[in-house]
Amino acid sequence: SSSLATFHRGLAATPVVDEVKFDQTISVLDDAFAEGRGVVLTVPHWSGHELVAAVIARRHPMVMLVRQASTPDRAARKEKWYRALGAETVLRPKHASTIKDAVAYLKVLKRGKMLAITPDLLADPGQGVEISIFGRPARFNGGAFALAIAAGAPMIRVSGMWQPDSSVILTFERAPPPPESEDREAAIRACVQDWCRWF
Protein backbone atom coordinates (compact mmCIF):
# COMPACT_ATOMS: atom_id res chain seq x y z
CA SER A 1 0.00 0.00 0.00
CA SER A 2 3.03 2.30 0.31
CA SER A 3 4.21 1.69 -3.25
CA LEU A 4 2.64 4.84 -4.71
CA ALA A 5 3.98 7.05 -1.93
CA THR A 6 7.41 5.47 -2.38
CA PHE A 7 7.27 6.03 -6.14
CA HIS A 8 6.57 9.76 -5.70
CA ARG A 9 8.45 10.64 -2.49
CA GLY A 10 11.12 7.97 -2.05
CA LEU A 11 11.35 5.10 0.42
CA ALA A 12 12.77 7.14 3.30
CA ALA A 13 9.71 9.40 3.29
CA THR A 14 7.29 6.51 3.88
CA PRO A 15 6.43 4.30 6.87
CA VAL A 16 7.95 1.27 5.10
CA VAL A 17 11.36 1.73 6.73
CA ASP A 18 9.72 1.19 10.13
CA GLU A 19 7.24 -1.48 9.00
CA VAL A 20 9.83 -3.94 7.68
CA LYS A 21 11.52 -5.58 10.66
CA PHE A 22 14.15 -8.29 11.07
CA ASP A 23 14.01 -11.19 13.50
CA GLN A 24 17.11 -12.69 15.14
CA THR A 25 18.00 -14.53 11.92
CA ILE A 26 19.33 -11.25 10.49
CA SER A 27 22.60 -12.56 11.93
CA VAL A 28 22.55 -15.20 9.15
CA LEU A 29 22.67 -12.42 6.55
CA ASP A 30 25.21 -10.39 8.53
CA ASP A 31 27.52 -13.41 8.84
CA ALA A 32 27.21 -14.29 5.14
CA PHE A 33 27.96 -10.72 4.17
CA ALA A 34 31.01 -10.62 6.45
CA GLU A 35 32.59 -13.47 4.47
CA GLY A 36 33.40 -10.92 1.76
CA ARG A 37 32.38 -13.03 -1.26
CA GLY A 38 29.16 -11.20 -1.92
CA VAL A 39 25.71 -12.67 -1.26
CA VAL A 40 23.05 -13.95 -3.63
CA LEU A 41 19.70 -13.04 -2.08
CA THR A 42 17.03 -15.25 -3.64
CA VAL A 43 13.74 -13.47 -3.02
CA PRO A 44 10.44 -14.90 -4.27
CA HIS A 45 7.76 -12.59 -5.61
CA TRP A 46 6.21 -12.14 -2.17
CA SER A 47 3.84 -9.20 -1.79
CA GLY A 48 6.00 -6.07 -1.53
CA HIS A 49 9.23 -7.97 -2.22
CA GLU A 50 11.01 -4.95 -3.77
CA LEU A 51 10.09 -2.69 -0.84
CA VAL A 52 11.39 -5.37 1.52
CA ALA A 53 14.62 -5.71 -0.48
CA ALA A 54 15.11 -1.94 -0.41
CA VAL A 55 14.90 -1.95 3.40
CA ILE A 56 17.42 -4.80 3.56
CA ALA A 57 19.67 -2.71 1.29
CA ARG A 58 19.72 0.01 3.95
CA ARG A 59 21.67 -2.47 6.10
CA HIS A 60 23.96 -4.02 3.46
CA PRO A 61 24.80 -2.78 -0.05
CA MET A 62 22.63 -4.53 -2.61
CA VAL A 63 22.19 -4.55 -6.34
CA MET A 64 18.85 -5.65 -7.76
CA LEU A 65 18.75 -7.64 -10.98
CA VAL A 66 16.04 -5.89 -13.02
CA ARG A 67 14.37 -7.21 -16.14
CA GLN A 68 14.45 -5.01 -19.22
CA ALA A 69 11.21 -3.09 -19.87
CA SER A 70 9.29 -3.64 -23.09
CA THR A 71 8.72 0.06 -23.95
CA PRO A 72 10.53 3.36 -23.30
CA ASP A 73 7.64 4.55 -21.08
CA ARG A 74 7.86 1.46 -18.92
CA ALA A 75 11.63 1.78 -18.78
CA ALA A 76 11.26 5.37 -17.52
CA ARG A 77 8.79 4.28 -14.83
CA LYS A 78 11.10 1.45 -13.76
CA GLU A 79 14.04 3.83 -13.54
CA LYS A 80 12.03 6.23 -11.36
CA TRP A 81 10.82 3.34 -9.16
CA TYR A 82 14.26 1.96 -8.43
CA ARG A 83 15.65 5.44 -7.85
CA ALA A 84 12.81 6.00 -5.32
CA LEU A 85 13.80 2.74 -3.61
CA GLY A 86 17.39 3.99 -3.41
CA ALA A 87 18.42 0.78 -5.15
CA GLU A 88 21.42 0.15 -7.34
CA THR A 89 20.36 -1.98 -10.29
CA VAL A 90 21.87 -4.09 -13.04
CA LEU A 91 19.83 -4.78 -16.15
CA ARG A 92 18.81 -8.26 -17.21
CA PRO A 93 18.23 -8.06 -20.98
CA LYS A 94 15.22 -9.71 -22.60
CA HIS A 95 17.43 -12.11 -24.52
CA ALA A 96 19.12 -15.06 -22.86
CA SER A 97 21.95 -13.94 -20.62
CA THR A 98 25.27 -13.66 -22.39
CA ILE A 99 28.78 -14.06 -21.02
CA LYS A 100 29.00 -10.25 -20.88
CA ASP A 101 25.86 -10.09 -18.73
CA ALA A 102 27.13 -12.84 -16.42
CA VAL A 103 30.42 -10.99 -15.95
CA ALA A 104 28.52 -7.84 -14.94
CA TYR A 105 26.59 -9.82 -12.31
CA LEU A 106 29.73 -11.55 -11.02
CA LYS A 107 31.41 -8.14 -10.61
CA VAL A 108 28.65 -7.18 -8.17
CA LEU A 109 29.55 -10.20 -6.03
CA LYS A 110 33.28 -9.60 -6.42
CA ARG A 111 32.74 -6.11 -4.98
CA GLY A 112 31.29 -7.82 -1.89
CA LYS A 113 27.72 -6.68 -2.51
CA MET A 114 24.45 -8.56 -2.43
CA LEU A 115 22.78 -9.43 -5.70
CA ALA A 116 19.00 -9.74 -5.26
CA ILE A 117 17.31 -12.07 -7.74
CA THR A 118 13.75 -13.42 -7.99
CA PRO A 119 14.26 -16.95 -9.32
CA ASP A 120 10.61 -18.05 -9.21
CA LEU A 121 9.60 -17.19 -12.77
CA LEU A 122 8.99 -20.05 -15.18
CA ALA A 123 11.50 -20.48 -17.99
CA ASP A 124 10.47 -20.80 -21.61
CA PRO A 125 10.19 -24.32 -23.08
CA GLY A 126 13.63 -25.75 -23.64
CA GLN A 127 15.24 -23.16 -21.34
CA GLY A 128 16.35 -23.40 -17.74
CA VAL A 129 16.34 -26.61 -15.74
CA GLU A 130 13.49 -29.00 -15.11
CA ILE A 131 12.48 -29.40 -11.48
CA SER A 132 9.41 -30.33 -9.47
CA ILE A 133 7.36 -27.76 -7.57
CA PHE A 134 4.08 -28.45 -5.76
CA GLY A 135 4.31 -31.98 -7.17
CA ARG A 136 4.33 -30.80 -10.78
CA PRO A 137 7.16 -30.53 -13.32
CA ALA A 138 8.30 -27.03 -14.25
CA ARG A 139 11.28 -25.26 -15.77
CA PHE A 140 13.05 -22.53 -13.79
CA ASN A 141 16.03 -20.42 -14.76
CA GLY A 142 19.11 -21.45 -12.82
CA GLY A 143 21.06 -18.21 -13.27
CA ALA A 144 20.95 -17.11 -9.62
CA PHE A 145 22.38 -20.43 -8.52
CA ALA A 146 24.96 -20.61 -11.30
CA LEU A 147 26.24 -17.17 -10.25
CA ALA A 148 26.46 -18.20 -6.59
CA ILE A 149 28.36 -21.35 -7.52
CA ALA A 150 30.75 -19.46 -9.84
CA ALA A 151 31.48 -16.78 -7.22
CA GLY A 152 31.50 -19.10 -4.21
CA ALA A 153 28.95 -16.70 -2.73
CA PRO A 154 26.51 -17.76 -0.02
CA MET A 155 22.85 -17.98 -1.02
CA ILE A 156 20.38 -16.44 1.40
CA ARG A 157 16.61 -16.88 1.30
CA VAL A 158 14.19 -14.44 2.88
CA SER A 159 10.56 -14.81 3.87
CA GLY A 160 8.20 -12.65 5.87
CA MET A 161 5.42 -13.02 8.39
CA TRP A 162 2.79 -10.29 8.20
CA GLN A 163 1.72 -8.84 11.56
CA PRO A 164 -1.70 -7.47 12.64
CA ASP A 165 -0.30 -3.91 12.53
CA SER A 166 0.61 -4.36 8.82
CA SER A 167 4.32 -4.65 9.55
CA VAL A 168 6.28 -7.63 8.32
CA ILE A 169 8.97 -9.55 10.19
CA LEU A 170 11.65 -11.03 7.96
CA THR A 171 13.38 -14.35 8.47
CA PHE A 172 16.67 -15.21 6.76
CA GLU A 173 17.95 -18.68 5.96
CA ARG A 174 21.20 -19.77 4.38
CA ALA A 175 20.83 -22.34 1.63
CA PRO A 176 22.95 -25.46 1.92
CA PRO A 177 26.12 -25.36 -0.16
CA PRO A 178 25.79 -26.76 -3.67
CA PRO A 179 26.67 -30.43 -4.04
CA GLU A 180 30.27 -31.10 -4.92
CA SER A 181 30.05 -32.34 -8.47
CA GLU A 182 32.00 -32.00 -11.67
CA ASP A 183 28.63 -31.86 -13.43
CA ARG A 184 27.86 -28.13 -13.18
CA GLU A 185 24.35 -28.50 -14.62
CA ALA A 186 23.49 -31.18 -12.07
CA ALA A 187 24.72 -28.92 -9.24
CA ILE A 188 22.61 -26.02 -10.53
CA ARG A 189 19.56 -28.27 -10.89
CA ALA A 190 20.04 -29.53 -7.31
CA CYS A 191 20.20 -25.93 -6.02
CA VAL A 192 17.07 -24.91 -7.94
CA GLN A 193 15.20 -27.96 -6.68
CA ASP A 194 16.28 -27.28 -3.11
CA TRP A 195 15.08 -23.67 -3.42
CA CYS A 196 11.71 -24.88 -4.73
CA ARG A 197 11.36 -27.26 -1.77
CA TRP A 198 12.05 -24.33 0.56
CA PHE A 199 9.57 -22.12 -1.31
Image (cartoon, rainbow, N blue to C red):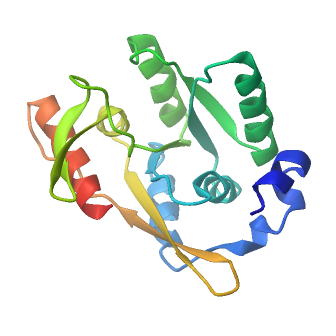
Q: What is the quadrant of residue 75 in the picture?
A: top right
Find the residue positioned furthest to the bottom.
164
Horizontal arrangement in the rendering, residue 157 relative to residue 152 (left or right): right
* Image position of 45 with respect to 72: above or below: below
Q: What is the quadrant of residue 76 in the picture?
A: top right
Q: Give percent across and percent down for residue 16.
A: 76, 66
Find the residue positioned furthest to the left.
182
Which residue occupies the foreground of this view, 112 or 188? 188
Q: Give percent across and percent down for residue 111.
A: 55, 34
Q: Dividing the image into 4 quarters, which one contains the N terminus?
A: bottom right
* Count of marks overlaid on the render: 0
> Residue drawn at (31%, 58%), measured in percent from left and top?
175
Regarding residue 114, the answer to whether it shows in the image is: yes
Q: Dividing the image into 4 quarters, which one contains the C terminus?
A: bottom left
> Residue drawn at (30%, 33%), measured in percent from left and top?
146
Q: Give percent across and percent down for residue 116.
A: 52, 44
Which residue occupies the foreground of this view, 16 or 109? 16
> Residue drawn at (77%, 73%), measured in percent from left and top?
18
Q: What is the quadrant of residue 83 in the picture?
A: top right
* Image position of 80 with respect to 114: above or below: above
Horizontal arrangement in the rendering, residue 134 relative to residue 199 (left or right): left
Q: Give percent across and percent down for residue 117.
A: 48, 42
